[in-house]
Amino acid sequence: MSSLVGKKAPHFKAGAVINGGEIVADFSLDQYLNKKYVVFFFYPKDFTFVCPTELHAFQESLKEFESRGCAVVGCSTDTEESHWGWLQMDKKSGGIKGVTYPIVADTTKTISLSYGTLFGDYDVDENNNLIATGPMIAFRGLYLIDKKGVVRHQLINDLPLGRNVDEAVRMVDALQFFEENGEVCPANWSKGKEGMKADHKGVASYLAAH
């Protein structure tokens, strides 16, 4: 699938666990439109090894995201009940107790597919049986979505490669700096550093289009 950057984030409604233990039936990112930025990230599976380190890392940085008007939402192909059970386990036992941001249950795998982060596909064998060509779980995808629902940053890691949450915060800063100042961010830019003036007509046209 081609990149989603510059395109509207795919719409979905699905079950999710919010506030660390409340199951809801029709969770959607639409609730954040025109209100908040969103960091929407996928992880492979509940009750694994690298995944809880990432979920805890996002929780530890949650105030950083919230201070920037940015919501954090996680997602895997596990069920709501699996998410709920994992949320009841202490960190020392491999659980994610204490995580409060929403965790979406992509049990149909259609969300992962629409975001281009599903590991595997369906095929038909010689007996016309439907078979999976992979484990049908999500890679470590991450999407920064602006207030208008447009994807502005996309990153997909293979299963063994955990993400840098500080980099996700930096990308929120970079997007907001561009929106507020109309200046672009050079390599290794971080909050507090100077940006670069670009073609103002081009920047203005881009902002108007998005």
Image: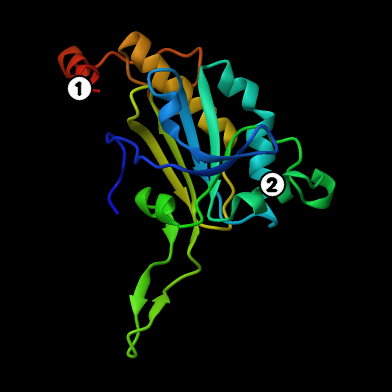
Residue 137 image position (x, y, % from top left): 51, 60
Vertical placement of residue 121 versus 31, above or below = below
Give the residue at x 46% y 57%. 108
In the displayed structure image, the side of residue 53 where residue 44 appears, left or right: left
Residue mark closest to the camera, 2 vs 1: 2
Give the residue at x 40% y 22%. 175
The way the protein has been coloured in the rendering is rainbow
Secondary structure under the numbered disc 1 in the rendered image: helix
Check disc 1 and give the amino acid type. Answer: Ala
Mark number, residue 209: 1
The N terminus lies in which quarter of the figure? Answer: bottom left
- Measured in 3D between alpha carbons, the distance from the residue under mark 2 to the one under mark 1, in whole angstroms, is 40 Å
Mark number, residue 84: 2
In the displayed structure image, the side of residue 146 where residue 23 appears, left or right: right
Where residue 118 sits, quadrant-wise, is: bottom left
Say which of 195 and 8 sits in front: 8
The C terminus lies in which quarter of the figure? Answer: top left
Where residue 120 sits, quadrant-wise, is: bottom left
